[in-house]
Image (tube, rainbow, N blue to C red):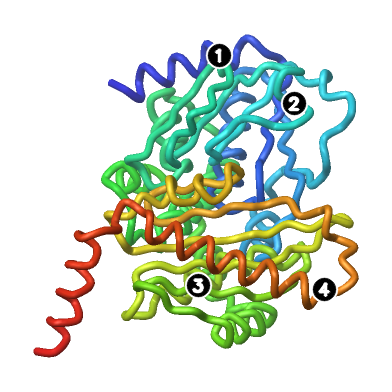
Amino acid sequence: MYFKNKALELTESIRRYKHLLIYIKGSPDPDALAAAFALKLICENFDIKVTIDSPDPPSLPQNIKLIKEIHLPIRFKRLDEDVKKYDAYAVLDHQSVSVEGLTGVIPCAVHIDHHKKTIKKIPVDFEILMEDIGSTSAIIILLIKELGLSFDEPEWKRAATALYYGIQTDTDNFQQATSLDMEALAIITPHVDKNFLKKINHIPFPKEAMNFLNLALQNQVIYKEWLITGIGFIEKKYRDNIALIGDFLLKREDISSVVVFSLVEKDKGLTLDASFRTRNEELNLNRLIKELSKNGGARRYKGAFQVNLDYFVHAPDPDLLWKTVHDTTIEALKKKIDDAAVGGIGYIFKLAKRKISSLFR
């Protein structure tokens, strides 16, 4: 009944507009890309024109292949000065709908996300924020089911394939998939391009990622079951490798959480980017990240933040800048780990119990 009512609300909201801009915030990952494409199909069913824009191109070969071979209609460009040519905008797979140059200029029509909710509220016509689901793609699929829409089979095959991969990547190969994710998968699985999924799932670890992984291993710091590591300066086009390395390092049995951070050089600017991964169900990762930086957040097992450091782009000694950022970030993370919800006596008892248990293995 929830999705049935929400499907009706979505229809009422989008039919107020003739041209909608779907704006992908941050690096375009499969879940955001697939959800955007599916929302575009929904809108076009009601004769609503849709444009999908992302300020940043993808960097991982899997994401590039997804866009190219599924023919996802997405433009990689900064916002036009004349954004009023759109009647409204939508944000999917991101905690916040705040977009500089859009918010307050045109209304936000749609916000669909599965991350932790933010305190800051901006008026939105239609909103679904669900923390008990593993992907935005699954939410979109369940809305389509209740809308009873039918699409041309070739077009639906493209969408279903992208949505399947979106769920797969955001649920760690279905390990964190909820019952709602599985319900959504059952709806689209008969329509997916299995050959494409096989190809994309067998793309090898990128060569650039291997280089960054070596740096991550050299620089790792282990602190209370956390692995923290910095990989120095990287170019914007390799930014997605930060998260990829975090996923890989979390496979270690002796740690429960990972942070990988880097200074990302882009558009004559500089940001500190950090990617978080955890297996600890008790950890409030979103709160920990928010205390480090307001420009960040998390769902249950994954998160990230960015800190703008454009002021330091012309630092005369890059090595000294990196050492300062590295040491400061390590100390800030250690303090927040100590202050986290899993800290205190409960955490110490849990850690001691594991160490004692290991003696009897």
| Of callouts 1 and 2, the N-terminal one | 1
Residue at x 41% of width, y 45% of height: 188
Residue at which label 3 appears:
228
Q: Which disc number belongs to residue 102?
A: 2
Position in image of residue 41 (x %, y %): 60, 32
Placement of the C terminus among the 4 image quadrants: bottom left
- Residue 101 occupies which quadrant of the picture? top right
Secondary structure type for disc 1:
helix
Q: Choose between 3 and 326: the one closer to the eye.
A: 326
Q: Residues within 10 Å of mark 2 (few under 14, many from 20)?
A: many
Residue at which label 1 appears:
13
Q: Is the residue under label 2 in contact with that under label 3 (CB below 8 Å)? A: no
Q: Choose between 131 and 298: the one closer to the eye.
A: 298
Residue at x 71% of width, y 37% of height: 52
Q: Amino acid at mark 3?
A: Ile
Position in image of residue 11 (x %, y %): 51, 16
Image check: 141 left or right of 105?
Answer: left
Q: Which disc number belongs to residue 167?
A: none
**Disc 3 and disc 2: Cα gap in Å?**
36 Å
Q: Is the residue under label 4 in contact with that under label 2 (CB below 8 Å)? A: no
| Of callouts 4 and 1, the N-terminal one | 1
**Disc 4 and disc 3: Cα gap in Å?**
21 Å
Q: Residues within 10 Å of mark 3 (few under 14, many from 20)?
A: many
Residue at which label 4 appears:
318
Position in image of residue 154 (x %, y %): 58, 45
